[in-house]
């Protein structure tokens, strides 16, 4: 046999699960991102007393596909004065970083590309930190004032909030004692507590930082539509634009997954050790059966044949997975159990990720946007000190429980209260600072009368 | 593909356009892309938040504004010149197209100005109905302002709530005169249409709902610390500056000057109703927001008072089919949602005005922009353009 072919076959044989996962990520994540956009539009519409997309497919379910098709066949436009190569490279870089960082995330106990790498979450954070390069380069290469301002804002924002997110993650790592994704989740099972309960401050600083990292409202300054047109994306259109767009949503999935893994117990069912909550085990099967039944119910009422076929397909998928959930347990010796565990974990993991992303959306439609100086002040004056103090306090709590035999929960409560006290102090100082800053404002604005700009 | 080798638009080889020269010189001088410490940004006329075709050239130091220049005229239609070639009645629909989000107010000002010139007065019934519709229009205009202003500052949702309320008002207009936006609701001498049967009920129902709805917007924004952070001390304008610039309306009142033509020189039927004039203290964007919110509440009260007692009687004064005002001039101003809207009409005794000059509040308030944005960040510029509540149709006419 041809040795090259042989070695390729040997490689595939050894790594087929990982390869399958990787291909699935590349194929499925853009689709999921498209559907997150649809969900976002629906959630937005719901909050704004309207319907959202309703035309393409039942309840607009085919809208993402139509949008993707439209974006793909759009004219490929590069501005004359843009730096052509970097203009081409930037969105690819963003998208690559977002997809690569998904490699180390475990979506459930079985679905993970890079299994058992000991740097786990560090890899995710490190690779996703490459994404901003795409934004900065894209803003630079566009040769447009709005783009460059957006790119600069993005740089400053990312540096500030990566720091916060990093410190928040450190508090979780301290508790877990490992960076390995699986080990983190298993430790939470062993500890019988999600780390959000042990270090709530760590979780909430991470939550805020992750919103800022993904450039989502109220921190969406790099692409602040009302100020910078579209920020770094101003000159982008068609498929390149959609790459940026996908990267943003893929990043949302990444930060939500990291938060879920470290603070929300990964793929563990809520309260796995509480006996009377055992009925939660049945939730995935029942939920999917209900969704499937609804699809069957609606399938006959669709105006077009393709729409009802689509609903039948969704219903079938729901029923198959529900059946696996419901009846796999007795057949433990079959590969069915393997699928059951994987799907069961993935269900809870994705549910938590969805809740996390829903929170993103909710905040986006509720809050106005920060101004840049306010954003920086929030980052450097409040969040970074708070995250640092939290790391120290988590360390103290761990020392108290291991060296001095304190009850772990007691130690955590005491240190969390200490952290919150520090937070109040920080807020107080910040108020004083901003009062002083606004008092100084009239003097600041009396810049010498200047002739017309431009 | 290198620069200049675009496959879409070939530029003749060897021909340098001005931009190239400037670019090269700047790059030669400093070796940087932008060529100077300062960045000039051209905001508009196609920009998501300049509320139409306003163009602002901003000179920036980093993100701080060090100078600005407004360029207007993209929506200039020569309304004042058109007036000279139309009869008095023919010109009335044109004024609706100036401040197109408050067409009823524009119409009221024009009709009353011509009535003053003709020395006729609209009958009491017409005046009350005019007041009701004008106050509804004020609410509608402020709602549109609130929604877009919040959108500029990044709050997406209030826009849709505001549009929902505005829709109710537009429905009332539609029922009354068949048009929603450019209504041409009033005629010189009174009204063309009698109030439809359920006008009072519709207005009452709207006012009842509106009470709670406006509370909803307040809940979303008034106490929101991001909103306060974005609007407090932003775009400060003190009362002396306001008066010197001729600013009027909520912009003036937010600076603490209690000047409202509805009280100062009552027109229509405003002297019959009790209402407050909200004023601010600091003259910042937050104060202007609060003043407009409170104005909507007051307008609602005026509507409620007015529908209680709409006098019976004719709706049209005795004016001829052909209007030939005596030779002379007249100035009449009303308090439109944006500020003082004045009409100066010069008559030569013919059926057409010799000259009409309109004092548009948006145009004059816009003058304050440069003063307000200096020293602020680009982000604040959109907030300040929003807080001035300009409509480019009125600025450019």
Image (cartoon, coloured by chain):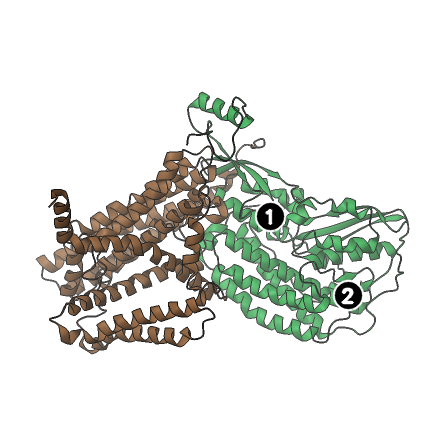
A316 or B49: which is nearer to us? A316
Q: Position of residue A143 (x, y in %)?
A: 44, 35
Q: Chain of mark 2?
A: B
Q: Position of residue A367 (x, y in %)?
A: 44, 57
Residue in the image at 17% along x and 69% along y? A336
Q: Are marks 2 and 1 in contact (CB under 8 Å)?
A: no
Q: Is residue A393 left or right of residue B97?
A: left
Q: Chain B is which colour? A: green
Q: Position of residue A83 (x, y in %)?
A: 40, 33
Badge 1: how crowded within 10 Å, few (<14), some, or many (20+)?
A: some
Residue in the image at 49% along x and 52% along y? B153
Q: Chain A is which colour? A: brown
In the rendered structure, find residue B52 and report the number of the disc placed on it.
1
Above or below for B33 versus B346: above
Residue A388 visible here: no
Q: Chain of mark 1?
A: B
B112 or A50: which is nearer to us? A50
Secondary structure type for disc 2: helix
The quadrant in which the C terminus of chain A is found is: top right
Q: Position of residue B314 (x, y in %)?
A: 83, 70
B286 or A71: which is nearer to us? A71
Residue B297 visible here: yes
Which residue is label 2 attached to?
A: B127
Closest to the camera, between mark 2 and mark 1, is 1
Q: Is residue A106 left or right of residue A437?
A: left
Above or below for A225 versus B198: above
* Image quarter of residue B194: bottom right
Badge 2: how crowded within 10 Å, few (<14), some, or many (20+)?
A: many
In the rendered structure, find residue A173 and report the number of the disc placed on it.
none
Question: Which of the marked residues, 2 or 1, is nearer the chain's N terminus?
Answer: 1
Secondary structure type for disc 1: loop
Above or below for A242 versus B291: above
């Amino acid at each position: 046999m041809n040795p090259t072919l042989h070695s390729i076959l040997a490689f595939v044989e050894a790594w087929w699960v990982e390869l399958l996962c990787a291909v699935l990520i590349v194929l499925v994540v853009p689709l999921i991102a498209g559907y997150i956009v649809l969900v976002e539009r629906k959630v937005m519409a719901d909050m704004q007393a309207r319907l959202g997309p309703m035309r393409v497919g039942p309840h607009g379910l085919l809208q993402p596909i139509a949008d993707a098709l439209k974006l793909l066949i759009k004219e490929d436009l590069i501005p004359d004065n843009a730096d052509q190569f970097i203009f081409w490279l930037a969105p690819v870089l963003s998208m690559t970083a977002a997809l690569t960082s998904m490699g180390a995330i475990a979506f459930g106990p079985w679905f993970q590309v890079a299994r058992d790498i000991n740097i786990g979450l560090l890899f995710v954070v490190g690779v996703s930190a490459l994404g901003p390069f795409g934004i900065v380069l894209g803003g630079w290469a566009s040769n447009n004032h709005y783009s460059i301002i957006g790119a600069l804002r993005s740089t400053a924002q990312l540096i500030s909030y990566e720091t916060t997110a990093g410190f928040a993650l450190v508090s979780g790592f301290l508790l877990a004692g490992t960076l390995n994704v699986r080990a983190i989740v298993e430790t939470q099972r062993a500890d019988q507590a999600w780390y959000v309960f042990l270090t709530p401050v760590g979780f909430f600083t991470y939550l805020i930082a992750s919103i800022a990292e993904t450039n989502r409202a109220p921190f969406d300054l790099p692409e602040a539509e009302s100020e910078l047109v579209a920020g770094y994306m101003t000159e982008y259109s068609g498929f390149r634009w959609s790459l940026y767009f996908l990267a943003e949503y893929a990043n949302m999935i990444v930060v939500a997954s990291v938060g879920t893994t470290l603070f929300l117990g990964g793929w563990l069912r809520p309260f796995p050790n509480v006996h009377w909550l055992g009925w939660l085990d049945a939730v995935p099967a029942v939920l999917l059966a209900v969704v499937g039944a609804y699809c069957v119910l609606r399938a006959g009422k669709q105006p077009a044949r393709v729409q009802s076929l689509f609903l039948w397909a969704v219903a079938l998928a729901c029923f198959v997975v529900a059946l696996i959930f419901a009846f796999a347990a007795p057949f433990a010796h079959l590969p069915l159990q393997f699928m059951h565990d994987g799907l069961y974990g993935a269900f809870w993991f994705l549910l938590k990720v969805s809740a996390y992303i829903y929170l993103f959306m909710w905040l986006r439609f509720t809050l106005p946007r920060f101004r840049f100086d306010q954003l920086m002040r929030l980052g450097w004056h409040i969040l970074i000190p708070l995250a640092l103090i939290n790391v120290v306090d988590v360390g103290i709590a761990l020392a108290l429980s291991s060296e001095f035999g304190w009850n772990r929960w007691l130690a955590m409560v005491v240190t969390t209260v200490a952290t919150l006290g520090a937070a109040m102090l920080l807020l107080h100082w910040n108020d004083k600072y901003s009062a002083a800053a606004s008092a100084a404002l009239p003097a600041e604005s009396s810049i010498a009368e200047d002739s017309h700009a431009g | 593909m290198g620069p200049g080798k675009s496959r879409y638009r070939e530029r003749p080889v060897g021909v340098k356009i001005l931009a190239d020269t400037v670019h090269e010189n700047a790059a030669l001088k400093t070796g940087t892309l932008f060529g100077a410490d300062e960045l000039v940004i051209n905001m508009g006329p196609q920009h998501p938040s300049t509320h139409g075709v306003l163009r602002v050239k901003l000179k920036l130091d980093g993100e701080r504004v060090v100078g600005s220049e407004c360029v207007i005229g993209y929506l200039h239609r020569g309304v004042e010149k058109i007036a000279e070639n139309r009869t008095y009645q023919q010109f009335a629909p044109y004024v609706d197209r100036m401040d197109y989000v408050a067409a009823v107010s524009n119409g009221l000002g024009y009709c009353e100005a011509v009535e003053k010139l003709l020395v006729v007065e609209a009958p009491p019934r017409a005046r009350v109905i005019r007041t009701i519709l004008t106050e509804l229009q004020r609410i509608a205009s402020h709602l549109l302002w609130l929604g877009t202003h919040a959108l500029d500052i990044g709050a997406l949702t209030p826009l849709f709530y505001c549009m929902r309320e505005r829709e109710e008002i537009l429905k009332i207009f539609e029922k009354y005169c068949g048009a929603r936006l450019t209504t041409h609701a009033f005629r010189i001498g009174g009204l063309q249409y009698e109030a439809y049967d359920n006008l009072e009920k519709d207005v009452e129902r709207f006012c009842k709902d509106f009470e709670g709805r406006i509370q909803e917007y307040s809940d979303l924004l008034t106490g929101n610390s991001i909103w306060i952070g974005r609007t407090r001390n932003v775009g400060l304008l003190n009362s002396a500056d306001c008066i010197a610039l001729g600013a009027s309306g909520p912009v003036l009142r937010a600076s603490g000057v209690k000047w409202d033509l509805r009280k100062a020189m009552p027109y229509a039927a405003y002297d019959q109703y009790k209402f407050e004039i909200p004023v601010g203290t600091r003259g910042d964007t937050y104060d202007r927001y609060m003043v407009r919110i409170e104005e909507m509440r007051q307008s609602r009260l005026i509507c409620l008072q007015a529908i209680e007692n709409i006098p019976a009687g004719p709706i049209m004064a005795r004016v001829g089919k052909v209007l030939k005002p005596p030779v002379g001039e007249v100035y009449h101003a009303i308090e439109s949602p944006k500020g003082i809207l004045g009409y100066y009409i010069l008559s030569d005794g013919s059926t057409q005005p010799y000259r009409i000059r309109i004092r548009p509040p948006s145009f004059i308030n816009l003058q304050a922009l440069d003063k307000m944005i200096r020293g602020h960040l680009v982000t604040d510029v959109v907030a300040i353009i929003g807080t001035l509540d300009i409509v480019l149709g009125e600025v450019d006419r």
